[in-house]
Image (cartoon, rainbow, N blue to C red):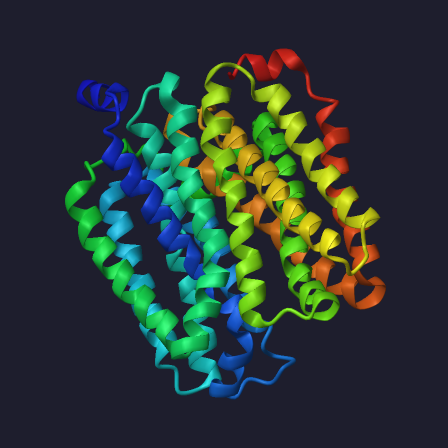
């Protein structure tokens, strides 16, 4: 125990943080590659247009399964071994997806791509075990900026690769990258052996207990689910608006998505400011920025160049609000108990991800039934709901966890 405490409190080498940030981005990107190339995949595998949505849905289901049943294992199993095992699962699933002869094989592979991608959520809390409390916000911010870059770059990268080499190349290339990453992590990461005081069944049952007894976990999860729901709603519908109202091609939409990547800079900045005790004010600011972004998109709905420029700004500010608040939330939940950090992260990310799935569904429905006006109105309401809940937060509670 003494040795583990020393490792945990030692300064983290910059190259390890860079490696973890890169790994998180490269791993989580696999959840989003298929989203912009569903059309070509459906044509090759024989999926009907009605069933094509199952590609995204099954990947999301796999990810939530992993968050609830695999991420908690990081509290009882040596973390490096766990990471390597599920990266192998991810590589096999990516290869199966690339060479799928039928729709059933591809959909099964999609489920396991989601399950294998939860390794990213094992690595984020793992990074916090290597650092002191004083460094935690900065380290989480840097690692999460890598993860968020992976989320934001996945769609345009998949679109560009598919337009030149075909969609199969996306999955083959990712399988090679993840295999190399697995070898690198297995050699570079220090071992982290938790002290298992629960069996696996008890571990899963304890998820409900943790959720019930940690009000800050519930609060931060709701904040992030609301903001990520708005984020998902925006990125589900904005390609349709760009294609319909501005006549953009697939590559044009990919360039637009790249512009939103600028918002990822908020993650490390938020982490540093949180280390200075500014978590509470930054949380409120993130919600206001997200609501204001949708407010601008709602007010300016013309098809002019000015409206397009404004839409680019909205994409950046919305991404900044979501990525910044994510780091603030994770910094707080990781302070709630080091021995349960994997489970706490699994609960937090599950709720956060469910919020994103709800946002995507609402986006598809609202755009089909009420166009951009209804979509942006719903997008405005989601962060406002979080803001109303935020005003019920007791300052003393949050300050005690700064």
Seen from this angle, which residue lies furthest left? 187
Question: Of residues 199 and 71, which is closer to you in this image?
Answer: 71
Residue at (52, 14) in percent of width and height? 277
| Apparent side of residue 354 relative to residue 200 in the rendered image (left or right) | right
> Image height check: is 354 above or below 137?
below
Residue 193 showing in the rendered view: no
The N terminus - image quarter: top left
Q: In which image quadrant can residue 293 be found?
A: top right
In the image, 164 versus 390, the foreground residue is 164
Relative vertical location of residue 239 with respect to residue 95 in this rendering, above or below: above
Looking at the picture, how far across and down is residue 147, in whole percent?
43, 45
Q: Quadrant of residue 323?
A: top right
Using residue 169 as the reference point, say whether residue 328 is left or right of it: right
Comparing 371 with 108, the one in front is: 371
Number of numbered tags placed on the structure image: 0
Task: Report x, y in % for residue 338.
Answer: 38, 26
Quarter of the image where one finds residue 97: bottom left
Relative side of 255 to 317, left or right: left
In percent of the image, x 46 and y 65: which residue is there? 33
Q: Residue, x 64% and y 64% (percent of image)?
A: 239
Q: Position of residue 101 (x, y in %)?
A: 39, 87
Q: Position of residue 401 (x, y in %)?
A: 52, 17
Query: Could one spot residue 156 in this view of the protein?
Result: yes
Q: Against 58, is 322 above or below?
A: above
Rendered view: 5 above or below 78: above
Q: Looking at the image, which residue is at 63% across and 53% down? A: 232
């Amino acid at each position: 125990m003494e040795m583990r405490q020393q490792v945990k409190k030692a300064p983290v080498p910059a190259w390890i943080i860079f490696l973890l940030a890169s790994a998180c981005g490269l791993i989580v990107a696999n959840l989003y590659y298929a989203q912009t190339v569903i059309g070509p995949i459906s044509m090759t595998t024989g999926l009907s247009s009605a069933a094509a949505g199952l590609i995204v849905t099954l990947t999301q289901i796999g990810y939530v399964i992993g968050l609830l049943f695999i991420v908690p294992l990081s509290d009882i199993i040596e973390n490096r071994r766990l990471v390597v095992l599920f990266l192998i699962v991810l590589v096999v699933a990516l290869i199966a997806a690339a060479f799928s002869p039928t729709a059933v094989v591809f959909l099964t592979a999609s489920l396991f791509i989601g399950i294998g991608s939860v390794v990213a959520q094992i690595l984020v809390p793992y990074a916090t075990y290597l650092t002191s409390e004083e460094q935690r916000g900065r380290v989480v911010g840097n690692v999460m900026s890598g993860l968020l870059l992976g989320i934001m770059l996945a769609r345009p990268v998949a679109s560009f690769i598919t337009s030149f080499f075909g969609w199969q190349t996306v999955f083959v290339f990712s399988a090679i990258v993840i295999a190399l990453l697995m070898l690198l992590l297995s050699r570079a990461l220090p071992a982290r052996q938790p002290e298992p005081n629960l069996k696996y069944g008890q571990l899963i049952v304890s998820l409900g207990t943790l959720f019930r007894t940690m009000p800050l976990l519930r609060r931060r999860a709701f904040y992030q689910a609301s903001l990520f729901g708005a984020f998902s709603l925006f990125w589900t519908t904005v390609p349709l608006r760009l294609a319909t109202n501005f006549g953009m091609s697939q590559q044009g939409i990919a360039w637009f998505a790249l512009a939103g990547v600028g918002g990822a800079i908020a993650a490390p900045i938020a982490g540093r400011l949180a280390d200075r005790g500014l978590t509470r004010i930054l949380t409120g600011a993130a919600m206001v920025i997200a609501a204001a972004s949708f407010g601008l998109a709602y007010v300016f709905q013309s098809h002019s160049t000015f409206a397009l420029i404004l839409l680019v700004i909205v994409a950046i500010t919305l991404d900044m609000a979501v990525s910044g608040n994510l780091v603030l939330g994770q910094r707080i939940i990781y302070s709630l108990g080091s021995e349960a950090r994997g489970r706490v992260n699994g609960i937090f990310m599950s709720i956060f991800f469910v919020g994103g799935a709800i946002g995507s569904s609402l986006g598809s429905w609202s755009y089909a039934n009420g166009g951009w006006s209804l979509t942006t109105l719903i997008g405005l309401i989601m962060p406002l709901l979080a803001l109303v809940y935020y005003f019920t937060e007791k300052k003393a509670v949050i300050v005690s966890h700064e």
